[in-house]
Amino acid sequence: MLDMVVSTAFSFAPSAVYYRGLHDRESSEFDYKSRNQKESIPEVTKCGNGEVYPLTEPVEWLWYWSWAWRYPSLVSSGKSLIYWRSKMRSNGAFVNRFGSDKKHSWVLNTNVDEEPMRSEGVTCPGENIFRVVDRQLVNVGGRESLKIWCLDYNYLITLTIAQAKTLAVTLPPWLSHIAQDVHPDGSDDPWDYNFRVPLFSANGEATVIDGFNCRTNSMRVCRLTPMEIVTP
């Protein structure tokens, strides 16, 4: 059960262009089927630049608070750390063998002599919202893509822990995606406690959008569909 009711409503800036991410079964990438017909698996895809991001201290805290602030009783009871440990295991939560059981977790204060955990630069497309730079197609790795806005990773690593927490609780849906599992029957469910994945980019064009330090990345067109936007 949710500890608090969190509104999913948000306003679109008149100049912004948004696309909805497509589930596996909606995308031609997997011939309109779930990518695995035998078991439930996380529904993920890589952004265009294929970067790997070390989860430095402020970045890991940003990941943690992106979902944890919504569940105050989970945090106050200490259960949020148990959950974090399980999700950030060796091959979980997009860390791909660089999880908290072997690598340094700032949140858990474990393996302090090891290198930090890292993100494989992936996101969860289905039902999540992408804010695109414009509708002009670009070729990335031989695939038609659209430029999208992500958080500026180079800016994030300069934050204090307190600043990372403040940022986490203000992230709009187009910068923080809910992770999901897709099932063999084509249905899907958000991960426990609506686990969220902030979008990063360390290269690309940099600018400030709605107060957020952003950089461009890209997403394959086959994973996106335009949204109908009604402006005031």
Image (cartoon, helix red, strand yellow):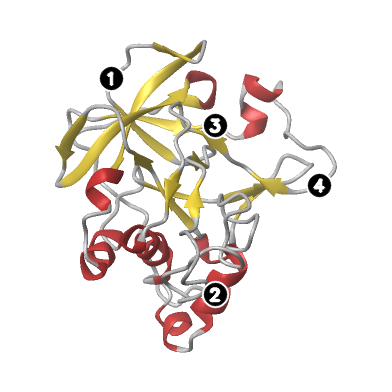
Tell me how far mark 4 sits from mark 1, CA to CA. Answer: 37 Å
Amino acid marked by disc 2 = Met
Is 62 left or right of 115, judged from the image as shown?
A: left
Residue nearer the viewer, 85 or 118? 118
Sequence-first tag of 2 and 4: 2
Residue, disc 4: 39
Q: Dot 1, how many residues are within 10 Å of its Cα: few (below 14), some (14-19), or many (20+)?
A: few
- CB of mark 1 within 8 Å of CB of mark 2? no
Mark in front: 3 vs 2 = 3
Q: Determine whether 194 is above or below 183 in the image.
A: below
Residue furthest to the right: 38
Mark in front: 2 vs 4 = 4
Circle count: 4
The disc at residue 22 is 3
Amino acid marked by disc 1 = Asp
Residue pictured at 36% horizontal, 71% vertical: 69
Sequence-first tag of 3 and 4: 3
Q: Is residue 232 visible?
A: no
Q: Secondary structure at mark 4?
A: loop
Mark in front: 3 vs 4 = 4
Residue, disc 2: 1
